[in-house]
Amino acid sequence: MNRRDFVFDSLRAATGVGLLGLGLSLYSQRAASLPAWALRPPGAQPEEEFNGACIRCGLCVRDCPFDMLHLARLGQDIPTGTPYFIAREAGCEMCEDIPCVAACPSNALDHALTDINKADMGLAIVSDQDACIAFQGQRCEVCFDNCPIRGDAITLETQHHERSGQQALLIPVVHAETCTGCGKCEEACILDEAAIKVLPRHLIQGKRGEHDRLVWERQPARTTYSGNLLDKLNGHSAS
Amino acid sequence: MLRRFNQLGVLFMFLLGPLFGAWLVTGNLSSSMTLDILPLTDPLLLSQSMLSGNWPALTGFVGAGLVLLFYALLGGRVFCAWVCPVNLVTDLAAWLRRRLGIRGGVRISRHLRWWLLGLVLLLPLLTGGMVWEYVNPVSMLHRGLIFGFGWAWLILAAVFLYDLLIVSRGWCGHLCPVGACYAAIGAAAPVHIAAPRRDQCDDCLDCFKVCPEPQVLKPALKGTRLKSDSSHGPVIDSIDCTKCGRCIEVCDQDVFGLALGWVDKDGFVKSNLSGQRPNAEQTKLQH
Ligand code: SF4
Ligand code: SF4
Ligand code: SF4
Ligand code: SF4
Ligand code: SF4
């Protein structure tokens, strides 16, 4: 082979591989997005870093004693091979020794997480007060009862019944600072479609500017929303 | 065949858990844990993870170190011939190709795999994501068998048809960056296939037909080199050799065997494990 052939062969290879790389990167941008209904195991690094770090081995899935984690398959809306769970199907039981994190060889589930109560898998929100029967004056404490850290992450609070003006309501209130997003409340909700949902935190929480920080800190953060949150989230696609 | 036994055996150990509830090995070839004490991690995957800006956990490093050590000693592409599940698919394609007498097809460079390996390592650096893992047939197949396929079988079907109809030995012999990475890992391994009795060769070419990397045979068997006139020793010293041993098995003239020890640049064993240098005359070419 002479030098000219060599140069052109190399150029051909470089071009082919470059095009392939471009295609792969574009595809991966789409393939890397996580839908709101899929949650990451405890300790997961922020989604963007997680996608680069996780080596798709499934050790977290295997070491979860409750078998509630899954590895995404090709064709699902979840980055292929990465672990996820669906709160409504089975939430995280918040194991004290966090075996999923301990098993992770890549640190995609950050080993710095040693206290499961500090986990941040998402945030619960009573997304549909019209459907939640507690808001309609009935007695239901199911989500509250199923929360592994009830009393902290979720409390029952009395509220005056707006419509009748007599009955006192006992409503579930989620506290954003302590909720770990384990999903047990959503799993347990007695309705056909849960009225309490766990979603990625950034979809729910607002953020104020630095200047009114003090006001914000005095107000306890609560996540309740009147009306159907999912309708609002899906607003543009539904109409 | 010992090799198939090993390939299927490895798969079987991984499958024992999900199928029968006996958890000998958990995880998959990307990273696994055997009997709760032996971590093994694919070095290429861990490298991609690190290049995306991540610092793995200790078990990840230990696991990758063990795998590196193993293949550095035994020869990297031993992974291909003895462990990788895709090899079952591509060998089937090659076998069918021989059987059906399919010839021709497209010719592409066997160096493309090194370009691809470069790409695989570059993409996490540029995008921060593990891009290759969205299509990698090796992990797709293994993960699919253990955790469920989804559409992953499509990728395997593509590899199979491509090998069968488009490029002979097209995936493992030309493109696969995983195989290239393992080849690099085992570049200095002291275990080789050699043709010590090459003077007995009767040119039936059976070995060329079964070898997945037939270009590695010629220097050792015929003593010829591509670029120079000096003769080549009997050791197959190309890092592409998968050490599958099929040439040993197929040859009626019993030409091939194992050679242990480090090899000099002329394809002779420098010092074999018993410490003697084999007589070069003995292996000189007859014609
Ligand atoms: S904390 Fe326990 S239940 Fe939750 S994902 Fe980890 S192992 Fe599973
Ligand atoms: S154990 Fe870690 S690297 Fe393996 S799949 Fe789970 S998160 Fe990913
Ligand atoms: S409120 Fe729901 S998501 Fe939050 S910790 Fe309790 S059960 Fe888990
Ligand atoms: S070349 Fe790649 S696909 Fe083929 S056997 Fe080796 S690792 Fe597996
Ligand atoms: S199979 Fe044996 S005899 Fe036939 S070409 Fe190869 S080395 Fe020679």
Image (cartoon, rainbow, N blue to C red):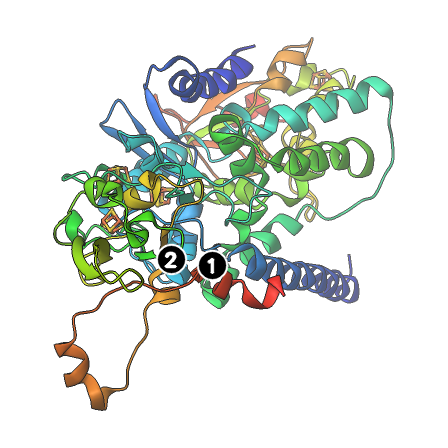
Give the crowd class for mark 2: few <14, some 14-19, many >=20 residues within 10 Å. many
Number of the label disc, if any, that sits on residue A127: 2
For disc 1, the marked residue is A230
Q: Amino acid at mark 1?
A: Leu
Q: How many marks?
A: 2
Q: Amino acid at mark 2?
A: Ser
Give the crowd class for mark 1: few <14, some 14-19, many >=20 residues within 10 Å. few
Residue appearing at x 28%, y 64% in the figure:
A162
Towards the viewer: B72 or A62: A62
Number of the label disc, if any, that sits on residue A27: none
**Where B2 falls versus A174 (above or below)?**
above
Residue A231, given in percent of the width and then of the height, sits at 50, 61
Towards the viewer: A92 or B209: A92
How far apart in space, not on screen, are marks 1 and 2 (Cα)? 7 Å
In the rendered image, the residue lying farthest to the bottom is A211
- Looking at the image, tell me whether mark 1 or mark 2 is earlier in sequence order: 2
Contact (Cβ within 8 Å) of mark 1 with mark 2 = yes
Figure quadrant of the C terminus of chain A: bottom right
On the same chain, marks 1 and 2? The answer is yes
Figure quadrant of the N terminus of chain A: bottom right
Residue A235, given in percent of the width and then of the height, sits at 55, 66
Chain label for disc 1: A
The quarter of the rendering in which ligand 4 is drawn is top right
Q: Which secondary structure, mark 2?
A: loop
